[in-house]
Image (cartoon, grey):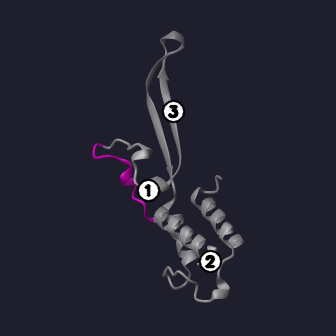
Amino acid sequence: MKAGVNDRALLLEMLRRLATYDPRKLYDAHGKLIAIKDLDDETRSAIIGFEYVQKFRGKGKSRVAVGYVKRIKLANRARAAALLKKMMGPTGKLSKRPANPLQQPTRAVLRQMQKEMIHCLTGGTT
């Protein structure tokens, strides 16, 4: 199998995960955020950034920690779905081989598609 086919399949699988993840899986039955290490692979792959901030009250020696703020930035599912549709082509079916072997994407094309995917999913912030 050619490397281009493997790269395309990997990109398609990444996009499929980003387009179909379930954000409810980030929380347990009590609404508490599950630790990243305990998330399943699909949910964990949807996380594109996070911020963990400790909050304090008071000043100087009377300053005490009062809690934490956890922010998780997730991939944009609509953008991932649109890009996945674009990559799948007019048939709407995933295939291991393109209909025309001359249309096999090169590594440069796949790298460009990957850059476009990252740009699309992060809203152009990276």
User: What residue range appears in magenta?
Assistant: 20-30
Q: Which residue is mark 3?
A: 53
Q: Is 100 within the magenta?
A: no
Q: Which of pointers 1 and 3 indicates the residue nearer the eye?
A: 1
Q: Residues within 10 Å of mark 2 (few under 14, many from 20)?
A: few
| Badge 1 amino acid | Asp
Find residue 59 and report its horizontal and vertical position in percent.
53, 14
Task: Tell me the number on the disc at residue 2.
Answer: 2
Q: Give neighbour class at mark 3: few <14, some 14-19, many 20+ (Cα, 10 Å).
A: few
Q: Taking 77 as reference, is 32 above or below it?
A: above
Q: CA distance from mark 1 to mark 3?
A: 25 Å
Task: Identify the residue at the far right of this view.
Answer: 108
Q: Which element type, helix, strand or loop, lies under badge 2?
A: loop
Cβ atoms at labels 2 and 3 below 8 Å apart: no
For the question of whether residue 91 can be seen, the reply is: yes
Identity of the residue furthest to the bottom in this view: 100
Q: In the image, what residue type sits under mark 3?
A: Val
